[in-house]
Image: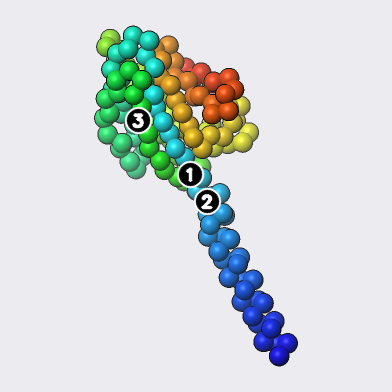
Amino acid sequence: MASSRNQNFIFMLISFLIILATTSFASALFSAKHVEIVNKLVTRATLIVHCMNKEEDKGVISLGPGDSFDFRFRVNLRKTTIYTCSFAWPGNTATFDILRADRDDNPQSKVGVCSECIWSIHEPAPCRDRRDGGQPNWFPWAS
């Protein structure tokens, strides 16, 4: 009788650990990201956006003033995920890594981790907004 109870307990414990491992642990290893890009050009020009990483091309998107484009994905296991976007508006082109795991999924990063990464695109620079209403983070264009 005691042996049967021990076997049931061990079975339940193992089942619980498997469920725990496949949900929260897997989610922690492959953190979910939601990137949103908002056209905040002061000139109110149309913004052409083209984002991609090594495995996926998000296509070319045209954003009117105030319009946004978003996509979701999970950071890879090695935390080397990078999404690079090119931006074009009349008379200008610029490039920026809209998501870098070493910057946006790193608790030691000076700008902190974002799961909802909201980017406002302005002429002088891209800006990562903060959901908590704190100071936004401005970054220089890569090109």
One can see residue 143 in this view? no
Mark 1 burial class by Cα count in 10 Å: few <14, some 14-19, many 20+: some
The answer to which image quadrant residue 16 occupies is bottom right
Q: Earlier in the sequence, mark 3 or mark 2?
A: 2
**49 left or right, relative to 74:** left
Asked if disc 3 and disc 2 are in contact, CB closer than 8 Å, the reply is: no
Residue at horizontal 31 percent and vertical 36 percent from the top: 58
Disc 2, SS:
helix
User: Where the C terminus falls, by quadrant?
Assistant: top left
Q: On the image, numbered disc 3 is attached to which residue? A: 69
Q: CA distance from mark 3 to mark 1?
A: 17 Å
Mark 2 burial class by Cα count in 10 Å: few <14, some 14-19, many 20+: few
Q: On the image, numbered disc 2 is attached to which residue? A: 27
Picture coordinates of residue 139 (x, y %)?
A: 49, 19
Disc 1, SS:
strand
Q: Nearer the viewer's eye, disc 3 or disc 2? A: 3
The amino acid pointed to by label 1 is: Ala
Q: On the image, numbered disc 1 is attached to which residue? A: 32
**73 left or right, relative to 14:** left
User: Farthest residue in the right direction?
Assistant: 2
Picture coordinates of residue 9 (x, y %)?
A: 67, 77
Number of labels in the image equals 3
Residue at horizontal 56 percent and vertical 54 percent from the top: 24
Mark 3 burial class by Cα count in 10 Å: few <14, some 14-19, many 20+: some
Residue at horizontal 27 percent and vertical 34 percent from the top: 59
User: Where the N terminus falls, by quadrant?
Assistant: bottom right
Q: Earlier in the sequence, mark 3 or mark 1?
A: 1
